[in-house]
Image: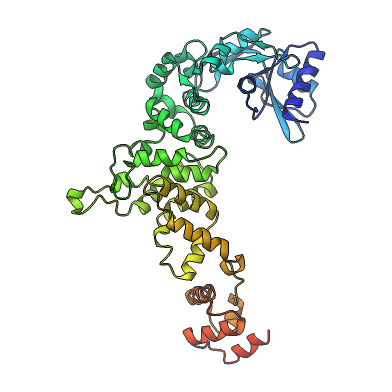
Amino acid sequence: MTPRELANSICDMLMRDGHQAFLVGGCVRDLLLGRDPADYDVSTDATPDRVLQIFPGSVGVGAQFGVVIVPAGLHKVEVATFRADIGSADGRHPEHVVFTSRPEQDVQRRDFTINGLLMRHQSGEVLDFVEGQRDLSAGVIRSIGEPERRFAEDKLRMLRANRFSARFGFRIDDATLEAIRALAPEIIQVSAERIREELTKMLTEGAARRALELLDQTELLRHVLPEVADMQGVEQPPQYHPEGDVWTHTLIMLEGLAAGCSETLAWGILLHDVGKPPTFKPISETGDRIRFDGHVEVGARMAETICRRLRFSNEDTDQIIALIANHMRFIDVKRMRESTLKRFIRLPRFDEHIALHRLDCLSSHRRLDAYDFVTQILKETPTEEIRPVRLLTGNDLRELGYQPGPLFTEILGALEDAQLEGQIQSKVAAIAFVYEQFGKGKRQDGLRSSLSA
């Protein structure tokens, strides 16, 4: 069963039980735009308790607000009871909810006109109480009713206006835009997790550059990502960055991100030069050219602070930091020792590292020699040469008479270097290498016992 079929069947069952039921919100918008909806929502006059009775196995995720999730296999549909929200104390949840039987009253609480459309699932007939079809045709993001009131109900809607505008290429209605600018400082009242999720969607829906420009124009950027806003006007050496300042360079890179790209790659690109503003040194100070000494290290630390502030997972934080910490290493790939190069290209999710580097080059000097070199190495080098099976283990070193401690790490590191360089290819050669480089351990029979193992 497809998500659409599940939504249709839910509407059918609700109607057989004597209730009104419509497809609603983003799925209707996307269907009218000729897009494939990511998910489906249903709106009904059935109370949450009744929805739970009609659909065994359903879950009331926001029953007090009239929201029930109906799952089926890999898919699920959100079923919401018609309601009227009254007030908002926390900028997210209504102070009071009144269930209603009137769909025209229900849509008045929704965010934007293009998301306030209802559709009869059997016929495709659209019920439009907010002139959403007009705004869809005109390409306008407009708040339903008074924008200040809509944003007071949920401050995250200010970011959502930016995202929808970027995603669909729509303009934001003047009154809606004015309200966002006036209320922009209040966006920090929204939880860090919700801000992160909305920003991530902006970066990965295929219109990241436009989204970032809109965040700046609506004055939200300074409040959610001040470190990124600081990139504006920070000049770069024209011989390496003819495209312009750090902000422009970052925008061009974001423009190269395809819809559905990796979330950590998108954030890595956004933040890869975040350390440049605080490390900027003009020609008058350096004597030769603009410099950003230590910007990689500073940027990695700043990125960690940003990731912690936005409550990224530890895994995603580590990857974003790694992308920033390693993005300048491509300059040296042709001069690296073979062992160093192999260690570099076996970094976790290296595909993201090389993708960032490629966009970095294409958005500046456009020289891809390092990218082509690494790509060829990846193509020609067997996996077993990049990640060879270790010839000796810590247990082997004990057998050879060495005592566990810092020396173990040094020996194993030197062994791996030699193996990656192609100097040793067997256990016998590895033992000989250890004895030659580090002397024999205290056990004189170590070589014999290890060779016989």
Q: Taking the image as drawn, is residue 23 in sight?
A: yes
Split into 4 quadrants, where in the image is the C terminus?
bottom right
Q: Is residue 410 above or below residue 212?
A: below
> Residue 98: where, in percent of width, then height?
62, 11
Q: Residue at x 41, y 58 (%)?
A: 329
Q: Nearer the viewer, residue 256 or 367?
A: 367
> Residue 370: where, in percent of width, then height?
44, 58
> Residue 326: where, in percent of width, then height?
43, 56
Q: Residue at x 40, y 55 (%)?
A: 328
Q: Nearer the viewer, residue 366 or 10?
A: 366
Scheme of colours in the image: rainbow
**Quarter of the rendering containing residue 128:** top right
> Residue 170: where, in percent of width, then height?
49, 22
Q: Is residue 440 above or below residue 187?
A: below
Q: From the viewer's perspective, is 161 left or right of 367?
A: right
Q: Residue furthest bottom?
A: 444
Q: Residue at x 80, y 18 (%)?
A: 13
Q: From the viewer's perspective, is 234 left or right of 169?
A: left
Counting the numbered discs, the total is: 0
Q: Nearer the viewer, residue 432 or 154?
A: 432
**Quarter of the rendering containing residue 9:** top right
Q: Is residue 40 above or below residue 317?
A: above
Q: Taking the image as drawn, is residue 306 in sight?
A: no
Q: Nearer the viewer, residue 216 or 50?
A: 216
Split into 4 quadrants, where in the image is the N terminus?
top right
